Amino acid sequence: MSDWRKSARDYVAKQQESQKRQQEDRWRRKQQEYKKEYTKELVGFRRKYDCCVCGEPAEPDVVTKPIAADGDYAPSGEVEVAIWTSPHDRRQCTVCGKWACEKHIEAGICKKCALDLPTGGAANFHLSIRYVLLFWALAFLLIFFLLLV
Ligand SMILES: [Zn+2]
Ligand SMILES: [Zn+2]
């Protein structure tokens, strides 16, 4: 094999090697970017979707999609992408509008709100106490005025 053939082949091999390294670098950077973005988004996501009863952190649905590193036309790998609008095991409470895990929501109402719901007897009881208090307040006022006159 003559020398010029070898130098031509070596040259191309070296070039391909360096191109591959660059591509790998770009891919690594891209992945780091995604990871940083993911962590940042997760904070806000949790603030919004964590269970309002037990505080259990919400996890976003995740899909895998092919992405290309910067400057590459062909996909150079797959990356896990979170769907930030889709917490898979959360329901929204129709009373307070907050989110709760499946264990703490029933018929669209979270446990916190359900405990505060006016249920038949209890509501009447509260109501009657209110009227008794109002009655006594008026009675006191009346006695007060009578004493004054
Ligand atoms: Zn919960
Ligand atoms: Zn609620």
Image (cartoon, grey):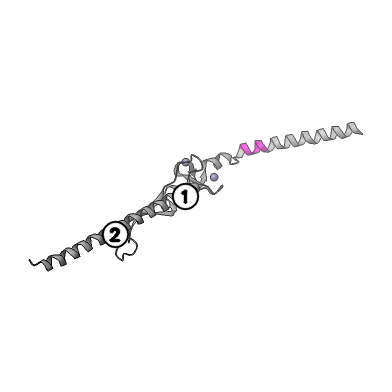
Does the magenta run of residues contain 45?
no
Q: Quadrant of the C terminus?
A: top right
For this orientation, the residue located farthest to the front is: 3
Residue 147 percent across, percent down from the top left = 89, 31
Residue 26 falls left or right of residue 122: left
What amino acid is labelled 2 in the image? Gln
Q: Secondary structure at mark 1?
A: helix
| Residue under the point 44% across and 54% down | 84
| Residue under the point 41% across and 51% down | 36
Q: Is mark 1 within 8 Å of ligand 1?
A: no
Q: In which quadrant of the rendered view does residue 14 lie?
A: bottom left
Q: Is 127 located above or below residue 71 in the figure?
A: above
Asked whether disc 2 touches disc 1, contact meaning CB atoms under 8 Å apart, the reply is no
What amino acid is labelled 1 in the image? Phe
Residue 83 falls left or right of residue 146: left
- Judge depth for marks 2 and 1 and give the one in front: 2
Residue 61 percent across, percent down from the top left = 39, 51
Does the magenta run of residues contain 125?
yes
- What residue sits right under mark 2 in the picture? 22
Check disc 1: other Cα within 10 Å, few if <14, some if 14-19, many if 20+. some
- What residue sits right under mark 1 in the picture? 45
In three-dimensional space, the C-alpha distance between marks 2 and 1, rounded to whole angstroms, equals: 34 Å
Tell me which image quadrant ligand 2 sits in.
top right
| Residue under the point 90% across and 33% down | 148
> What span is colored magenta in the figure?
121-126
Per the picture, the main secondary structure of the magenta-coloured stretch is helix
Check disc 2: other Cα within 10 Å, few if <14, some if 14-19, many if 20+. few
